[in-house]
Image: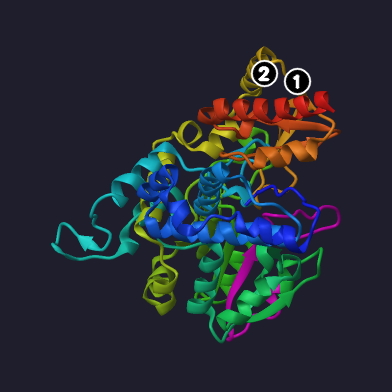
């Protein structure tokens, strides 16, 4: 708690005198303001908070501080309660220009997905009930048909994230057998998640083929034997190799595998989960799930909350024989998703099926946003801030895709830039606001990218910019 304690001169007698100024818990609770707090938060919560507050103040007095004035205690207690009870998971305004920002929750959900969450979460539902048969059903039945229609997969299963999707696939289909992977694809993604570690945990045995920069088809062909369960391709969704590099096409790997042994699987971990052609939006083409399956991959794994634009989930799409094995595996229960995830995912997939992904799914709205529209938003912000006496500039800039998707790829954007002498301090104040704002800093300027700011957050964003910048200006003028 931010309690300011004024230093006092004497140590022993003065410290004891300050201690004697402290109210008792009963005195605090009898205050009319604190009585109102007790009716709002409950007497037990307020009592505990009062004890914590008194402990903080006592520690301050012990190092030379003074006790707050008697009439300050109710407000201090209200402030302490607010800080203690504030939710740790909070809505944030993302003005960084990073569309799929892993640290800021990745993809914001569409209105259709949010509505589905409210509808399913606020009532009973048929999560595991077959309405037609009037008997127990399976949660695995939800969304599988939508995924099949959108991707061409024979079947699909949904787990809690893409790492789980890879783990379940390897555990159920490759345990105690070998999996061939190019050395160039033995990657580590966020949080220290490494493909070789996952293979070991799953019970599969890694066989590295090729070199760091060049892997040929013959490198996969030579080690294939009766113990080989799969050839696995890991899409480099968070890095890019350029220069003297070679990697067989997926279609070449599938032909090799299926000609060598009809039961030899090709597993393609796409990670980002693109269902739309990113090349249409000025970006490098990202492998789509549809193209991977059309190339003959038996199993494709991908995320729900990256380029798909839905909730956190791991989706495994592929041949019905293999998906059935995954569905029966004991780990499928441990990794399954809940009703709210299924509701949001179903609504997100329907936006694709209806051909409205770029109109309804936020990350695709951002990717497809016309550059002129972004400039107009930045200029409108500039005009509103100018009316409040805050000078800003409009800069050309770039927005990043982020989230382990399309590494190094950016989209042109227009940024609102505000020049300040202490950008780090003001950026920290923006992050400390009731609805935190996260922006970028460049050349002593705070930068705000309209591409990633939701329209319904604009008013709050501008209000908080005004508050923080004016506070800094007042401090500077006073100094």
Task: List x then y, in percent, for residue 148.
Answer: 40, 53
- Is residue 123 left or right of 326 when viewed as pictured? left
Colouring used for the render: rainbow
Q: Most prominent secondary structure in the magenta stretch?
A: loop
Q: Quadrant of residue 454?
A: top right
The image quarter containing residue 11 is: bottom right
Magenta stretch contains residue 312: no
Secondary structure category for the residue under label 2: helix
Any part of residue 248 in sight: no
Q: Are marks 2 and 1 in contact (CB under 8 Å)?
A: yes
- Front-most of 104 and 369? 104
Q: Residue at x 67, y 37 (%)?
A: 430
Numbered label tally: 2
Q: Quadrant of residue 266?
A: bottom right
Q: Residue at x 64, y 23 (%)?
A: 374
For the point 59% across and 80% down, the residue is 201
Task: Point out the tag, 2 or 1, that comes first from the N-terminus.
Answer: 2
Of residues 23 and 242, which is closer to you in this image? Answer: 23
Q: Is 234 contained in the magenta span?
A: yes
Residue placed under numbered mark 1 in the picture = 392
Depth check, front residue: 153 or 395: 395
Q: Is residue 281 visible?
A: yes
What crowding class fits label 2: few (fewer than 14 Cα within 10 Å), some (14-19), or many (20 or more)? some
Q: Is residue 213 left or right of residue 93?
A: right
Question: What is the x, y in percent for residue 455?
Answer: 53, 28
Residue 165, given in percent of the width and then of the height, sits at 51, 66
Task: Specify the segment rendered in magenta.
Answer: 220-247
The quarter of the image holding the C terminus is: top right
Above or below residue 433? Residue 61 is below
Question: In the current view of this chain or complex, which residue is farthest to the left?
Answer: 134
Residue depicted at x 61% and y 58%: 20
Which of the numbered marks, if any, corresponds to residue 385? 2
């Amino acid at each position: 708690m931010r309690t300011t304690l004024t230093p006092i001169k004497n140590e022993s007698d003065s410290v004891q005198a300050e201690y004697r100024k402290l109210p008792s818990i009963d005195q605090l609770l009898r205050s009319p303001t604190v009585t109102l707090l007790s009716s709002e938060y409950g007497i037990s919560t307020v009592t505990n908070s009062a004890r914590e507050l008194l402990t903080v103040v006592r520690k301050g007095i012990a190092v030379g501080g003074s006790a707050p004035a008697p009439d300050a205690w109710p407000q201090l207690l209200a402030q302490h309660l607010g800080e203690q009870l504030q939710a740790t998971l909070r809505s944030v305004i993302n003005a960084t220009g990073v569309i799929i920002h892993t640290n800021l929750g990745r993809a914001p959900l569409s209105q259709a997905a949010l509505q589905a969450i409210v509808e399913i979460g606020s009532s009973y539902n048929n999560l595991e009930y077959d309405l037609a048969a009037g008997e127990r059903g399976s949660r695995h039945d939800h969304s599988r048909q939508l995924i099949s229609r959108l991707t061409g997969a024979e079947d699909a299963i949904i787990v809690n994230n893409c790492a789980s999707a890879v783990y379940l696939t390897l555990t159920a289909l490759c345990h105690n057998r070998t999996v061939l992977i190019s050395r160039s694809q033995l990657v580590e993604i966020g949080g220290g998640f490494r493909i070789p570690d996952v293979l070991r945990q799953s019970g599969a045995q890694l066989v590295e083929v090729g070199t760091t920069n060049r892997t040929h088809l013959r490198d996969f062909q030579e080690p294939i034997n009766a113990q080989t369960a799969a050839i696995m391709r890991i899409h480099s969704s968070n890095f890019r190799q350029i220069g003297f590099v070679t990697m067989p096409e997926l279609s070449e790997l599938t032909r090799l595998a299926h000609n060598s042994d009809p039961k030899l699987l090709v597993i393609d971990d796409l990670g980002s989960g693109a269902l739309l052609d990113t090349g249409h939006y000025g970006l490098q083409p990202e492998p789509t799930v549809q193209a991977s399956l059309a190339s003959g991959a038996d199993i494709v794994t991908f995320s729900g909350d990256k380029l798909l634009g839905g909730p956190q989930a791991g989706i495994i799409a592929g041949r019905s024989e293999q998906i059935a094995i995954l569905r029966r595996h004991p780990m499928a229960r441990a990794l399954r998703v809940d009703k709210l995830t299924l509701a949001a995912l179903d609504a997100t997939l329907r936006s694709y099926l209806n051909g409205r992904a770029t109109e309804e799914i936020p990350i695709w709205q951002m990717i497809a946003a016309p550059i002129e529209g972004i400039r107009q938003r930045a200029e409108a912000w500039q005009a509103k801030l100018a009316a409040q006496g805050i000078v800003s500039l409009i800069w050309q800039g770039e927005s990043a895709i982020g989230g382990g998707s399309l590494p190094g790829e950016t989209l042109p954007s227009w940024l609102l830039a505000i020049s300040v002498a202490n950008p780090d301090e003001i950026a920290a104040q923006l992050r400390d606001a009731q609805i935190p704002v996260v922006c970028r800093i460049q050349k002593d300027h705070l930068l705000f990218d309209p591409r990633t700011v939701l329209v319904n957050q604009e008013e709050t964003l501008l209000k908080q910019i005004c508050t923080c910048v004016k506070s800094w200006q007042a401090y500077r003028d006073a100094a």
